[in-house]
Image (cartoon, rainbow, N blue to C red):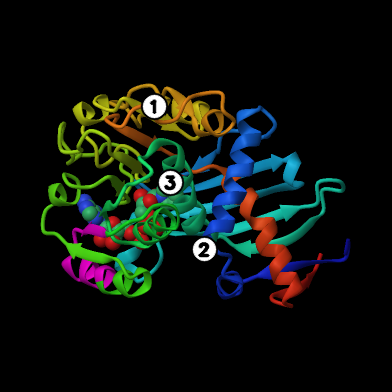
Amino acid sequence: MDTQTLLYLSRADVESVALDMPTIINLLKAAFKEKGQGRVEMPPKPGIHTQPDAFIHAMPAFIPALKSAGIKWVSGYPQNSKRGLPYITGLLVLNDDETGLPYAVMDCTWITAYRTGAATALAAQYLARKQSQVAGILACGVQGRTNLIALATLFPIQRVYAYDILPEVQRRYVAEMSAQLGIEMIGVGQPKQAVVESDLVVTSGPILKHPTPTIEKDWLRPGAFASAVDFDSYWKGEALAQFDKLSTDDRAQLRYYRSIGYFQTTPDPYADLGEIVAGLAPGRERDDERTMAMNLGLAMDDMAVAPEIYRRARERGIGTRLAL
Ligand SMILES: NC(=O)c1ccc[n+]([C@@H]2O[C@H](COP(=O)([O-])OP(=O)(O)OC[C@H]3O[C@@H](n4cnc5c(N)ncnc54)[C@H](O)[C@@H]3O)[C@@H](O)[C@H]2O)c1
């Protein structure tokens, strides 16, 4: 272990490592299994809020089984797209679990995009029907892309209905994702069209503390799975109440968010994803169940993936050494 320097990985460095989605899903699976068995240290994320509906969160976690310890310092600014800047930006620090020394600092934009998609797919592996073929994506940004890439890794998706509030963004998404995944992509003019025929629905628009949600009761058909990457911003309370199984990635964090004003109409989850992956709570039990993953995004997700990015970057000589 080099105790004199750390490895800095810029956004381009992390992107050039290009860790593949099946590996990311497997890393998350291992981490969630540990969490389900109570072997992950992860305090609820504190944050500061410099603009309405914006956040900068501190997200520390330690996964002993993966020897992974560190923190992500991540911002989410809904107005950034108007400035030509990403919604999500930030840095991640990895610490040696024996000495505490920081050994890597990396941009966290890519990792946040991909691990969130992978968490959706992991939940879907347990909660969606195996033969799910039709996906609906509401909001065609970064998460709209990585969530679809992750779901297409695990499911035989034949067709995708895509909706974005900005027609030009939607058009670009349809063109790019059909070229990348070779799946039939249909841009739709109304959110409802992206929900009613879909087996897998992802909502990935802005997170709002006081949302004016769109998706109504009965739009989602029985047997479908949904992932609310944007919390409850897209789903009316009556639609959320209709899910037979609503899971989350961390009940304590959901309770915390509820206490500060979010999730006022979201029912209590029946299980944490960790409990489901560890076999302590059931996944889907019937073909006609409506199921939802309300994943808030955990520090553990980042710490499951970041050491593998570091290892591959080192192997390939990617990144810049900085003195401690
Ligand atoms: N739960 C998690 O773990 C997690 C992790 C990362 C990001 N997020 C959240 O995911 C969301 C998307 O992040 P991103 O990085 O993809 O942002 P992005 O800016 O790349 O994409 C957001 C998209 O939403 C579109 N949009 C805005 N309002 C809409 C509406 N009403 N209907 C449809 N589309 C609409 C925008 O045009 C844009 O294309 C954010 O709310 C972010 O906070 C959640």
Task: Say whether residue 42 is visible.
Answer: no
| Front position among marks 1 and 3 | 1
Question: Depth check: 283 or 273 in front?
Answer: 283
Residue 253: where, in percent of width, then height? 50, 31
For label 3, the SS is helix
Give, as a three-letter code, the residue at label 1: Glu
Q: CA distance from mark 1 to mark 2?
A: 34 Å
Q: Tell me the distance, in whole angstroms, between the alpha carbons under discs 1 and 3.
A: 19 Å
Determine if the C-beta at disc 2 is less than 8 A from ligand 1. Answer: no
Q: Where does residue 107 sit, x and y in percent of width and height?
A: 58, 64
- The numbered mark at residue 110 is 2
Q: In this image, 306 relative to 98: left or right?
A: left
Q: Residues within 10 Å of mark 3 (few under 14, many from 20)?
A: many
In the image, residue 196 above or below residue 183:
above
Q: Nearer the viewer, residue 169 or 47?
A: 169
Q: Is residue 288 visible?
A: yes
- Range of magenta residues: 159-174
Which residue position holds label 3? 120
Which one is in front, 116 or 27?
A: 27
The residue at the point 56 percent across, 23 percent down is 280
- Mark sitting earlier along the chain (1/3): 3
User: Residue 172: within the magenta?
Assistant: yes
- Marks 3 and 2 sit apart, C-alpha to C-alpha, by 16 Å
Sequence order check, earlier mark of 1 and 2: 2
Asked if labels 2 and 1 touch by Cβ distance under 8 angstroms, the answer is no
Quarter of the image where the C terminus is located: bottom right
Task: Give the image location of residue 138, x and y in percent.
Answer: 25, 53
- Label for residue 285? 1
Tell me whether circle 1 and circle 3 mark residues in contact (CB < 8 Å).
Answer: no
Work out whether 226 lies above or below 182: above
Q: Which residue is at 41% across, 42% downward?
A: 124
